[in-house]
Structure formats: structure tokens, C-alpha cells
């Protein structure tokens, strides 16, 4: 095991903010996970698990140990005519797993194509896109407790998944290391085409009987055309979650703002945070190197040398203006450290 000291994290996360960690360890084999956790002294803590850093904002140097998991492997656990159950190592890249499944005709994850990051991080916020969430295919996941080194398996119900949330962001925040994820995929997939732009793009391409491969291609095309690439300008995708509000509160807003963009939600009405931010005229605004993307107001951007504190200050101003105009407090989707 190699422990790097005072390692810069600038290249290790997609915002590209200058920050460092006191210690940095990469784990390449499952059997090393528990011994590494147990070997860390109090002086080397706290511990933070970093995937590809596509959902984090560093506002200061990390005082403990950052661990990155590089374990690889996709193993078939069981299958029948309808389903296949696969165990994926926590260090696998999410989109490479999607590609692997789609190639074999295993359906369920094709709408989640091209989401950055690693498998181990995917349950943390129950990744979702184009009408599908991870919870729909996740069977269970394996973890190691970061204090005791004990292994524990969580079922889908144990994870308490919600819209961009799980128990790992709430009561168990920062306590467990997700080391493997088991997915249940369909051999006779039912396509999820409820999301407008996927359906439209399929029609535009003249595809009348789409396969999961077509859906993956279309989702990749839409994402590439819409979302800013962190290699061009540092970002972590959507900075805020779409807020879910009560139906009576929504009725009042709809009267005042007939064009308000909303979606049905089991807990009320979900609003498009991008629309709310856009209405407050934030699109394309910049404060030094911290900015709001000119096309995607939900994406905050590091144009070069912004600090995490500057990005956070911009986020605070945006939250304040949305609160004043609409009475809605936006919650960050990005993990602020
Ligand atoms: C351009 C862009 C587009 C995006 N689009 C989407 C989208 O459509 N839908 C969506 O849901 N998200 C999206 N995201 C957010 C991001 O891709 C996901 O949240 C992803 O799952 C993060 O993976 P990661 O490996 O980069 O995690 P990191 O950013 O490294 O970590 C995120 C959090 O998870 C914790 N963590 C990471 N790995 C583990 C582990 N093995 N065990 C325990 N804790 C862990 C970290 O400590 C941190 O708190 C987007 C991001 C970008 C930059």
C-alpha cells in the first residue's frame, strides 16, 4: 500500500479546485480494504472515500486520509429467463458498466448512460437521469464500516433511497465505505421512454422500435450536446437538487408564474431548479472565475482558478435570490467539503 502525503486533489475531482489532502491511499484489491481501514491511526483520520470526484466541492484542504477504490470486476451471481443478477466491484466506472450491460442486452441502466463517476458512489445520491433511478435496479450493496472495519450488506430497502438521496447522505453520512453493488437487470427489457427528450430524439432519428442500445446512444447524444464537459470548464453537474414542494404551495406559485416548470412527484410537485435560477437572471453570470453556466443555470463552473469558497459564495447568492423571489430554499446536490 502506498500512502501519499500532502497530495493535491485538483486533478482528482471534476471541479478542478485547488485543495490537498494530508494523506491519499489507492486500494486496488478487495482483500486490502479492511486491513487499510484498520491500519489508519487517529492522527490519519477523518477518512473520506473519493470516487471520480464528480459530485464534490472542496472548500478547504482535507485534514485526514482520502481513499480511492480501484477494484474491478463484474460477476454474474445468478440468472433465469427474465433477470440476471450481477455483482460489480466498487471501483468500476459507472458508464463502463452501463456499456457492458447494454452490449449484452441486459436492460435497466441504459437511461443512466454517461453519468460520470464510479459504481461505489452511485448509491450515495441514488443517481438518476431521464426518468430512471439507480434504486430501480439495485438489489443490495456491500460496505465496510469506516471506524470498526466491520462488513455489512444493505438491501435496497435498508438504503432508504429517495430523489437524489439515501441513508448514506443522512443518518449514516460518512460512516460506510461502499465496496460492491449488486444489480438486477432485465433480459427482456421494458424501455423507459417517459422522458420527453429521449422519445423526441428517437423519433427524430427515425427509430420506431428502439432497443436498449438505441436508448443508450440517444441518451449519450443528448447529454453530450447539453451538459458542459468538466474537461472544458470545471463543474460537478447539477449544483442544486430540484426542490419538491407541497401541492398547495405549488398552486399559489402557478397562479403567479403560469410558465413555471414542474413535474409530478409522489411527495408533492417537483420544480425545475434550473428554471427558478434562470428567472432570477443568473445564467452566464460570473464573479471572477466562479460562474453560472451560460446555457445550464443549474451548473456552477470553475473557469480556471476559482476557490471552493468562491463557488460556495456564488451558490449562496443564488439560493438567496431564489428564496426571495419564490420562497423556496434550494438544497445543494453536490457534497460540500
Ligand atoms: C457533468 C456531470 C453530469 C452529471 N450528471 C448526473 C446525472 O445525470 N445524475 C446524477 O445522479 N448525477 C449526476 N452527476 C453527479 C455525479 O456524476 C454522481 O453523483 C456520481 O455518482 C458521483 O460519482 P463519483 O465517483 O464521482 O463520486 P465522488 O464525487 O467522488 O463522491 C461523491 C460522494 O460519494 C462519496 N463516495 C464516493 N465513493 C464512495 C464509496 N465507494 N463509498 C462511500 N462513499 C463514497 C464521497 O465521499 C462523496 O461524498 C453529474 C456530474 C457531472 C460532473
Image: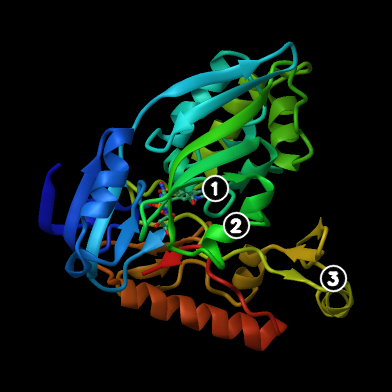
Residue at which label 1 appears: 123
- Residue depicted at x 33% and y 77%: 310
* Distance from Cα at disc 2 to Cα at disc 1: 7 Å
In the drawing, does residue 179 fall left or right of residue 263?
A: left
Residue at which label 2 appears: 166
Q: Nearer the viewer, residue 64 or 154?
A: 154
In the drawing, does residue 79 fall left or right of residue 54?
A: right
Q: Earlier in the sequence, mark 2 or mark 1?
A: 1
- Residue depicted at x 19% and y 63%: 41
**Which disc number belongs to residue 258?**
3
- Residue depicted at x 81% and y 64%: 267
Front label number (3 vs 1)? 1
Q: Is residue 255 visible?
A: yes
Contact between marks 3 and 1 (CB within 8 A): the answer is no
Depicted 326 relative to depicted 79: above or below: below
Count of residue discs: 3
Depicted 324 relative to depicted 276: above or below: below
* Distance from Cα at disc 3 to Cα at disc 1: 36 Å
Contact between marks 2 and 3 (CB within 8 A): the answer is no
Q: Position of residue 63 (x, y in %)?
A: 22, 70
Q: Nearer the viewer, residue 327 or 156?
A: 156
Dot 1 lies on which element?
loop
Few, some or many C-alpha atoms within 10 Å of disc 1 (few <14, some 14-19, many ≥20)?
many
Q: Earlier in the sequence, mark 3 or mark 1?
A: 1
Few, some or many C-alpha atoms within 10 Å of disc 2 (few <14, some 14-19, many ≥20)?
many
Amino acid at each position: 500500500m502506498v500512502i501519499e502525503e500532502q497530495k493535491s486533489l485538483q486533478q482528482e475531482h471534476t471541479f478542478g479546485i485547488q485543495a490537498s489532502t494530508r494523506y491519499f491511499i489507492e486500494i486496488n484489491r478487495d482483500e486490502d480494504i479492511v486491513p487499510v481501514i484498520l491500519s489508519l491511526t487517529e492522527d490519519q483520520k477523518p477518512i473520506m472515500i473519493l470516487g471520480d470526484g464528480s459530485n464534490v466541492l472542496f472548500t478547504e484542504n482535507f485534514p485526514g486520509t482520502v481513499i480511492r477504490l480501484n477494484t474491478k470486476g463484474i460477476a454474474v451471481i445468478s440468472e433465469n429467463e427474465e433477470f440476471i443478477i450481477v455483482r460489480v466491484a466498487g471501483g468500476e466506472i459507472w458508464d463502463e458498466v452501463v456499456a457492458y450491460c447494454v452490449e449484452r442486452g441486459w436492460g435497466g441502466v441504459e437511461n443512466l448512460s454517461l453519468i460520470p463517476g464510479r459504481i461505489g458512489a452511485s448509491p450515495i445520491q441514488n443517481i438518476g437521469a431521464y426518468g430512471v433511478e439507480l434504486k430501480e435496479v439495485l438489489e443490495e450493496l456491500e460496505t465496510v464500516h469506516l471506524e470498526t472495519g466491520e462488513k455489512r450488506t444493505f438491501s435496497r430497502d435498508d438504503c432508504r433511497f429517495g430523489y437524489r438521496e439515501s441513508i448514506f447522505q443522512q443518518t449514516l453520512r460518512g460512516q460506510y465505505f461502499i465496496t460492491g453493488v449488486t444489480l438486477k437487470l432485465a433480459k427482456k427489457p421494458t424501455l423507459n421512454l417517459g422522458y420527453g427528450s429521449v422519445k423526441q430524439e428517437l423519433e427524430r432519428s427515425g427509430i420506431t422500435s428502439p432497443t436498449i442500445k438505441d436508448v443508450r446512444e440517444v441518451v449519450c447524444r443528448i447529454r453530450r450536446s447539453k451538459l458542459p464537459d468538466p474537461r472544458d470548464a470545471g463543474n460537478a453537474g447539477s449544483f442544486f437538487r430540484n426542490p419538491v414542494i407541497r401541492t398547495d404551495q405549488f398552486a399559489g406559485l402557478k397562479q403567479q408564474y403560469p410558465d413555471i416548470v414542474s413535474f409530478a412527484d409522489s411527495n408533492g410537485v417537483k420544480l425545475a431548479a434550473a428554471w427558478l435560477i434562470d428567472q432570477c437572471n443568473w445564467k452566464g453570470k460570473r464573479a471572477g472565475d466562479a460562474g453560472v453556466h451560460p446555457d445550464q443555470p443549474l451548473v456552477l463552473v470553475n473557469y480556471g482558478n476559482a476557490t471552493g469558497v468562491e463557488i460556495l459564495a456564488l451558490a449562496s447568492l443564488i439560493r438567496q435570490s431564489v428564496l426571495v423571489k419564490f420562497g423556496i430554499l434550494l438544497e445543494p446536490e453536490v457534497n460540500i467539503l
